[in-house]
Image (cartoon, rainbow, N blue to C red):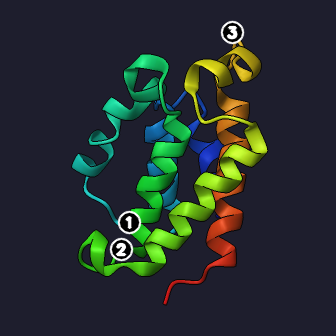
C-alpha cells in the first residue's frame, strides 16, 4: 500500500476519526511498516488543526513527524539526511499550497462534509514524492 493510499484509508470517517496530523503518522505506520506503539499516534493529537490554534498546518507537522521517524538516526543533531529531507518537504509544501498556515489553508481547501481530506491527500502526495526522491541511507 502506498503512503497516499494509506492516508485515504485512514480518512474513511466510517472507520476512523483521525485528525490531519494523526492521519499522516497512522498512514506512515501502515505504509512503511513502522510497527509504532499507539502512544506514538497519541503524541500527534496536539498538532491537529494547526497546533489546535489554526497556526502551522497539522499536515506539515505530521509530515515532519513522519520524516523524523524515517530519517532520524539517534538524535536530531546526528541526522543530516533528516534535516535535508525536512527542509525539502517544508519548501515543497509551501510552494504547492502557498502557505503552511492552517487558517489560510482551511479557507481555501476545507469542505464542510469532508473537512480537510482532499488537502491531507494532496499534502501526503507531496511528502510521498519527497520520501521517494530521498532513499534512506
Q: Quadrant of the N terminus?
A: bottom right
Q: Secondary structure at mark 3?
A: loop
Which x, y percent locates residue 120?
Answer: 64, 38
Q: Is the residue marked by circle 1 packed among few (<14), some (14-19), or many (20+) residues within 10 Å?
A: some
Whether residue 85 can be seen here: yes
> Which is closer to the viewer, label 3 or label 1?
1
Q: Is the residue marked by circle 3 packed among few (<14), some (14-19), or many (20+) residues within 10 Å?
A: few
Which x, y percent locates residue 23?
Answer: 50, 41
Q: Earlier in the sequence, mark 3 or mark 2?
A: 2
Which x, y percent locates residue 32?
Answer: 50, 69
Left or right: 33 in relation to 3: left
Image quadrant assignment for residue 10: top right
- CA–CA distance between discs 1 and 2? 6 Å
Q: Residue at x 65, y 54 (%)?
A: 91
Q: Earlier in the sequence, mark 3 or mark 1?
A: 1
> Which is closer to the viewer, label 1 or label 2?
2
Q: Residue at x 47, y 63 (%)?
A: 67
In the picture, the disc for residue 72 is: 2
Q: Residue at x 33, y 33 (%)?
A: 45
Contact between marks 1 and 2 (CB within 8 A): the answer is yes
- CA–CA distance between discs 3 and 1? 32 Å
Left or right: 94 in relation to 103: right
Task: From the image, tell me which residue sits under label 1.
Answer: 69
Task: From the image, tell me which residue sits under label 3.
Answer: 112
Amino acid at each position: 500500500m502506498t503512503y497516499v493510499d494509506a492516508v485515504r484509508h485512514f480518512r474513511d470517517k466510517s472507520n476512523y476519526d483521525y485528525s490531519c496530523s494523526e492521519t499522516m503518522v497512522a498512514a506512515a505506520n501502515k505504509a512503511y511498516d513502522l510497527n509504532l506503539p499507539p502512544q506514538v499516534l497519541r503524541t500527534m493529537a496536539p498538532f491537529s488543526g494547526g497546533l489546535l490554534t489554526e497556526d502551522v498546518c497539522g499536515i506539515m507537522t505530521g509530515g515532519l513527524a513522519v520524516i523524523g521517524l524515517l530519517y532520524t538516526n539517534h538524535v536530531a543533531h546526528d541526522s543530516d539526511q533528516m534535516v535535508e529531507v525536512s527542509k525539502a518537504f517544508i519548501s515543497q509544501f509551501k510552494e504547492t499550497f502557498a502557505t503552511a498556515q492552517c487558517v489560510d489553508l482551511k479557507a481555501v481547501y476545507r469542505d464542510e462534509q469532508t473537512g480537510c481530506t482532499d488537502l491531507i491527500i494532496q499534502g501526503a502526495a507531496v511528502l510521498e514524492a519527497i520520501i521517494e526522491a530521498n532513499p534512506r541511507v
